[in-house]
Amino acid sequence: MLANIIELSGAVCVVQCRKQGYDAVLEETQTLPSGENLLVLRTVHSISCTISSTFYPQVDALSCVRSCNREFMDDGWCDFQNNRGYCDWDGGDCCASTVRGGCVRLMFPSLCTSFLCQCIDPFAAENMASISDAGSSNNALHERKSTIKRTIRYGRHHSITEPMSYPVVDASQDMFTISLADAAFLLRNDVYLDRI
C-alpha cells in the first residue's frame, strides 16, 4: 500500500472543462469591508496528488465557468459577457468610475436590457455604499449583488451526455484510476483530467 501512495504522490494532471470556452475554477469567498461576502473564482490549470493520495486542489471543489473574451476586456466598451468578477468586470469598462475616459459605451444599447449592461462591479465608486446611504439605494445595490451571486453560482452547470474522456491518469510506468466518486463528480461538472 505504501508503495502505491509513493508512486501516486507528486503526479500532476492538467485540468480542462469538457465544453470549449469554459475554464476550471475554484470558488473562494472574500469578505468585503462592508461585511458582505463576494464569490471569487480562481482559475485552476492543474491538480496534483499529495503524499496522502488525495488530489490538491480537491476534485469536488472544481467548477466550470464561461471563459472571458480577453480581446474585448479593457477596450473602452462595456461587453455584458465579460461584466462579471471572473473577467475583472470587463476590465472596468462598464462603470464610469473605472472606464478610461469616464464614459461607459455600449455597442448596441437598445439590445442591452440585462443587468449585465449596468455598473455591477462591487468595488466601483458607484457601488461603494456608505453607512449613511438611503435605504432605497442600498436595497438596489443589494439586489444587484444578489443577482450577480445567483448568476455566478447557478449559471455554471451544464448537462453532459458524452462519456468522460480521461478517467485514468498516468502516474509514471503504472496507471492509477481516480475514485468512482471523483469520476462521477468530474462527469457531472464537465471537467476532465490529463497527465502533464
Image (spheres, rainbow, N blue to C red):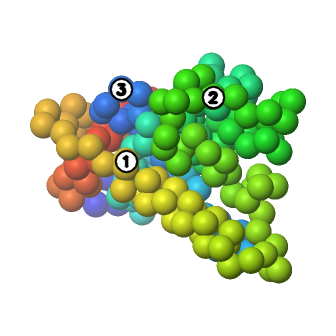
Q: Is residue 33 left or right of 192 when viewed as pictured?
A: right
Residue 9 visible in the picture: no
Q: What is the spatial separation of the Cα atoms under label 1 and label 3, in whole angstroms? A: 13 Å
Q: Is residue 179 left or right of 82 when viewed as pictured?
A: left
Q: Position of residue 150 (x, y in %)?
A: 43, 60
- Residue 96: numbered disc: none
Q: Mark 1 vs mark 3: give the one in front.
A: 1
- Residue 156: numbered disc: 1
Number of residues whose C-alpha sits closer than 10 Å to that of mark 3, classed few (under 14), some (14–19) or many (20 or more) = few
Q: What is the spatial separation of the Cα atoms under label 3 and label 2, in whole angstroms? A: 27 Å
Q: Which residue is mark 2?
A: 106
Q: Position of residue 166 (x, y in %)?
A: 25, 34
User: Which of the two discs, 1 and 3, labels the residue nearer the N terminus?
Assistant: 3
Residue 125 picture quarter: bottom right
- Residue 20: numbered disc: 3
Q: Residue furthest front?
A: 110
Tag 3: amino acid: Gln
Q: Mark 1 vs mark 2: give the one in front.
A: 2
Residues 80 and 25: in front is: 80
Number of residues whose C-alpha sits closer than 10 Å to that of mark 2, classed few (under 14), some (14–19) or many (20 or more) = some
User: Which of the two discs, 3 and 2, labels the residue nearer the N terminus?
Assistant: 3
Task: Give the quadrant of the N terminus.
Answer: bottom left
The residue shown at (37%, 47%) is 156
Q: Position of residue 179 (x, y in %)?
A: 22, 55
Q: Is residue 11 left or right of 148 when viewed as pictured?
A: left
Q: Mark 3 vs mark 2: give the one in front.
A: 2
Task: Give the quadrant of the C terminus.
Answer: top left
SS at badge 1: loop
- The answer to whether the residue labelled 1 contacts the one labelled 2, judged by CB atoms less than 8 Å apart, is no
Tag 1: amino acid: Arg
User: Which of the two discs, 1 and 2, labels the residue nearer the N terminus?
Assistant: 2
The residue shown at (19%, 52%) is 184
